[in-house]
Amino acid sequence: MTEKEIGKITHFFNKISVGVIELKDTLKDGDTIHIKGATTDFKQTARSMQIEHDKIEEAKAGQSIGLKVNEQVRQGDLVYKVTAGEEKPKVKLAKAKPVKAKAKAKPKAKPAKAKKSKAKPKAKAKAPAKKKKKSKKK
């Protein structure tokens, strides 16, 4: 299935569930359309198209039509016509070669721990003590 952008939603009438579409290409009664936006994404068959309250069977580029929609649409959502046809070929990725499982390596012997020497650590040199200042009494 291929899709071609044919218009854009310019307004939505919530109570009657009708979207206003400004068309860039033709749309006929019975065509499958895909409406897609930031939070909108559904397909439906185009039925009940009108221009100024007059039912129409086909709308041409440049016209604004009212279309009964199955779900809520939003201003700025794009409208695509879905046509049965060959999809654009996708880029084929090279298949990854299977990785051979390696044989488990034998566990290595742990190195012996260094023995602690029994020698006492050298004493640290102490910093010279500070002299107290004598306070003068008056």
Image (cartoon, helix red, strand yellow):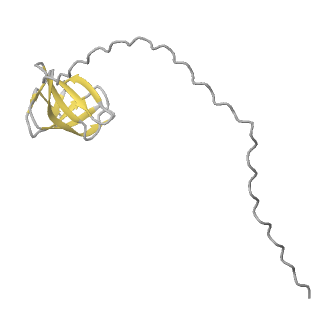
Left of 59 or right of it: where is 16? right
Is 105 drawn above or below residue 11 in the view shown? above
Residue situated furthest bottom in the rendering: 138
In percent of width and height, residue 106 lies at 48, 13
Name the residue nearer the viewer: 58 or 43: 43
Q: As drawn, which residue projects farthest toward the right?
A: 138
Residue 38: image location, x then y, percent: 31, 36
| Lateral position of residue 115 relative to residue 84, left or right | right
Find residue 72 and report its horizontal and vertical position in percent. 32, 32
Q: In which quarter of the image is residue 20?
A: top left
Instruction: Choose between 66 and 84: the one closer to the eye.
Output: 84
Task: Using the rendered view, name the quadrant where residue 16 is placed.
Answer: top left
Can you say which quadrant of the picture contains the N terminus? top left
Total labels drawn: 0
Residue 102 position by quadrant: top left
Q: In this view, does 114 lie above or below 22?
A: above
Q: In which quarter of the image is the C terminus?
A: bottom right
Q: Which residue is drawn at 9% across and 34% down?
A: 25
Above-or-below relation of 65 to 107: below
Question: What residue sits 57% from the left and 24% below the top?
Answer: 111
* Residue 49 x, y percent position in the rendering: 17, 29
- Say which residue appears at 26% left-offset and 18% top-offset: 96
